[in-house]
Image (cartoon, rainbow, N blue to C red):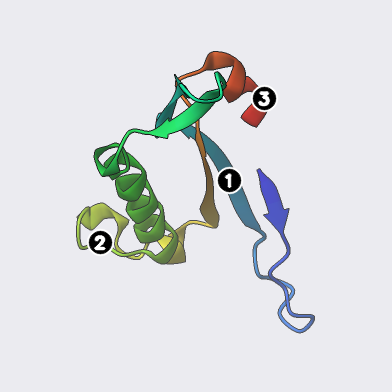
Amino acid sequence: VHEVDQSDGENSSAPPLHICHMTALWRYSTTALNPYTGVLEPKNLGPGFYGDSIALLLAIHHFNNGIGSVVKEVEGINERCNVRLSLDINDSMSSMSHSVKTV
């Protein structure tokens, strides 16, 4: 969690903003043997594997901006809560060792 000072010099009573950063590892590709080079290369698994990422990004956007169109309890939360979320999404390539190196 990172803390950001929101005061502008005149309004020193503004509470600090807390940025909570998350890292997600999702399987967007796998490795496949290239028959011409004999090297393992990434192989895209297709658009069906991106839906979870899009849903998570939308949920974070709604939370950070207090948009309650999907979850009514989130409406105005940006005014009541001084936490904001950020996200880093990485391709695990279906490999534990690649995932560890990525993070």
Residue found at the far bottom of this picture: 10
The residue to which callout 2 is attached is 68
Give the percent coordinates (x, y) of residue 54: 33, 49
Give the percent coordinates (x, y) of residue 48: 24, 39
> Which element type, helix, strand or loop, lies under badge 3?
helix
Tell me the distance, in whole angstroms, between the alpha carbons under discs 2 and 1: 20 Å
Q: Nearer the viewer, mark 3 or mark 1?
A: 3
Q: Judge the density around disc 1: few (<14), some (14-19), many (≥20) Cα neighbours within 10 Å.
A: few
Q: Earlier in the sequence, mark 3 or mark 2?
A: 2
The amino acid at mark 2 is Gly
The residue to which callout 3 is attached is 101
Q: Is residue 92 visible?
A: no
Tell me the distance, in whole angstroms, between the alpha carbons under discs 3 and 2: 37 Å
Residue found at the far right of this picture: 9
Q: Quadrant of residue 75?
A: bottom left
Q: Judge the density around disc 3: few (<14), some (14-19), many (≥20) Cα neighbours within 10 Å.
A: few
Q: Residue at x 68, y 69 (%)?
A: 6
The residue to which callout 1 is attached is 20
Q: Quadrant of the C terminus?
A: top right
> Which element type, helix, strand or loop, lies under badge 1?
strand
> Which element type, helix, strand or loop, lies under badge 2?
loop
Residue found at the far front of this picture: 36
Tell me the distance, in whole angstroms, between the alpha carbons under discs 3 and 1: 22 Å
Q: Residue at x 30, y 37 (%)?
A: 49
Mark number, residue 66: none
Q: Earlier in the sequence, mark 2 or mark 1?
A: 1
Give the percent coordinates (x, y) of residue 74: 31, 56
Q: Is residue 87 left or right of residue 55?
A: right
Give the percent coordinates (x, y) of residue 83: 54, 53
Q: Is residue 11 visible?
A: yes
The amino acid at mark 1 is Cys
Q: Residue at x 60, y 16 (%)?
A: 97
